Amino acid sequence: MPTTTAALTISSTDLTSSAINVAANTELTETGNSIGLQSTSGLARRQTESVDQYTLFYADDYVADKSNKVYLKNLSVTPSEYFLVSIDDEPMGRLYAGDFAFFPWSATDGVKAAFTITLTNTWATGDTLTFDGVTMTNGATETGTGFIDIIKLLKFPNWTVAETAATVCTFTAKNSNYLGLIEESTASDDWVKSSSSGVNTVARTVAAVASANDIKITPSAATSMTLESMLIYQAV
């Protein structure tokens, strides 16, 4: 198994009336045992070009409440430049030029929105539904079952789709922070439907709850800044 050691040294001769020398090190292990952490995002550098907030790690992508560890370092050489580090939208602190941080991360995710679309009656050739920037086109005169077979094979930017009954597809948000609401109606504003005798019924099944643990950074300057990062995590 991998062996990963984290070490920290803090020393000063004049911060207090006596010298400070603190040295700590530990081997990074999984929750509740001595097995070394076996997964990492790899050492990466994120270059920012604006003062917009950036998401470094999405909690949805990792197992919650495990022995995850995060390393961050501001590679700027301009003393006044910093990254504001946040856990979701709660500020954690600023990393000024040259500063680094190493901390545990629970990766607690939210709840992903989900809804169903039920197709009934007969859909004519060329009939369409448009959602999430994707146009679903009926290739031939089909019942709801046939059109569902077409829809379930499509790719959507913010949603995954699966056939859950002969005339029903279930859409699930890819990220718990995608909070777009799906209206429960036969003429939802979220769907654009061409004229047809076919009927589509939208029903929200799960309301979204945003993740409380995404790791985000906000640069202090719109000029190019670079943050070094690495996540060492427990995969199961």
Image (cartoon, rainbow, N blue to C red):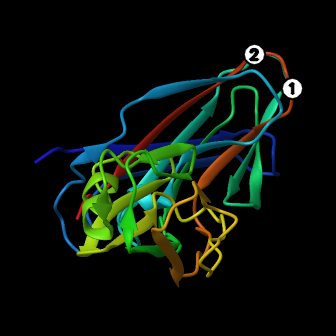
- Residue 187 % position (x, y): 64, 72
Q: Secondary structure at mark 2?
A: loop
User: Which of the 4 image quarters holds residue 147?
Assistant: bottom left
Residue positioned 41% across, 73% down in the render: 65
Q: Position of residue 86 (x, y in %)?
A: 71, 54
One can see residue 226 in this view: yes
**Residue corresponding to mark 2:** 224
- Disc 2 residue crowd, few under 14, some 14–19, many 20+, Cα 10 Å: few
Find numbered disc 1 in the image and state the secondary structure of the residue it sits on: loop
Tell me the residue that label 1 is attached to.
221
Q: Is residue 27 visible?
A: no
- Quadrant of res 116: bottom left
Q: 126 or 65: nearer the eye? A: 126
- Quarter that holds the C terminus: bottom left
**Left or right of 69: which side holds 89?**
right
In-front residue for pair 217/68: 217
Q: Position of residue 118 (x, y in %)?
A: 41, 76
* Residue in the picture at 25% in, 53% down: 37
Q: Quick one: which residue is furthest to the left in this view?
A: 1
Q: Amino acid at mark 1?
A: Ala
Q: Position of residue 231 (x, y in %)?
A: 42, 45
